[in-house]
Image: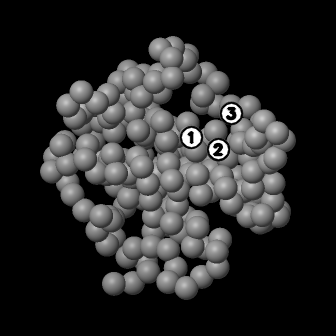
Amino acid sequence: MTDSDCPWEPPLAGTEVAHLLGALDRLRTTFRWKADNLDAAGLGTRLGVSALTLGGLLKHLALVEDHVFTTRLTGEAIGAPWDTIEVAGGGDWVFTSAADDMPDQLYGYWDGAVERSRARLGAALATDGLDQLVYLSCPDGRRASLRRLVFDLVEEYGRHTGHADLLREAVDGLVGEDPPAGWRPKSGTFRVGD
């Protein structure tokens, strides 16, 4: 197996930035694999009393990506597509509103957000690296570092990739820790290994 078969694998020996970004992209890719190539019924499958669905997770993680690498990074407004979506239903709207979205919309939200996040994070890293202070701050004025934002996103994906494992298994029995060698998405525009 070559690196091109599994481009989502973090380096075996690399810099802190390479390992951190590698871990994030591995989680992104594993999450996307778990959510890939499903129709509305598959994206809307629930387990027991939980309201979580793969469609809801796609939309939630898309919003988180844009929020982290826009608002928390720079303090700017989150922008499209979120500024054109009617928010209703309280804090869970992003999960529950996904039931009203077509699969192509949900994949588009997530794929677009990841692409924007990669560009914004790359630009920030090129400027001042992981140690730079970002817009996000505590009530006492202490500001977070870019490193903290990236670690927080790794944690968010770790949690929700576990949810995606269970949801996808309930949809069609798909199991596994990582995508199979050579995997590429069948839906959407996500680029593996960028």
Marks 3,2: beta carbons within 8 A: no
Residue in the foreground of this view, choosing between 91 and 121: 91
Marks 1,2: beta carbons within 8 A: yes
**Is residue 101 visible to us here?**
no
Location of residue 6 (image quadrant) = bottom left
CA separation, marks 1 and 2? 6 Å
**Which residue position is annotated with label 3?**
78
- In percent of width and height, residue 61 lies at 49, 41
Residue in the foreground of this view, choosing between 100 and 124: 124
* Label 2 Cα neighbours within 10 Å, binned few <14 / some 14-19 / many ≥20: many
Where disc 2 sits, the SS reads: helix
Badge 3 amino acid: Ile
**Which residue position is annotated with label 2?**
68
Which residue is depicted at the point 56% across and 40% down?
A: 64
Which residue is depicted at the point 51% across and 66% down?
A: 23
**Colouring:** one colour
Where disc 1 sits, the SS reads: helix
Badge 1 amino acid: Val
- In percent of width and height, residue 113 lies at 57, 44
Which residue is depicted at the point 70% across and 52% down?
A: 120
Q: Nearer the viewer, mark 1 or mark 3?
A: 1
Quadrant containing the N terminus in the rendered view: bottom left
**Is residue 176 visible to us here?**
yes
Where disc 3 sits, the SS reads: loop
Location of residue 151 (image quadrant) = bottom right
* Label 1 Cα neighbours within 10 Å, binned few <14 / some 14-19 / many ≥20: some
- In percent of width and height, residue 133 lies at 81, 54
Marks 1,3: beta carbons within 8 A: no
Which residue is depicted at the point 20% across and 54% down?
A: 174
Q: Earlier in the sequence, mark 1 or mark 3?
A: 1
Residue 120 lies left or right of residue 49; in this view the side is right
**Which residue position is annotated with label 1?**
64
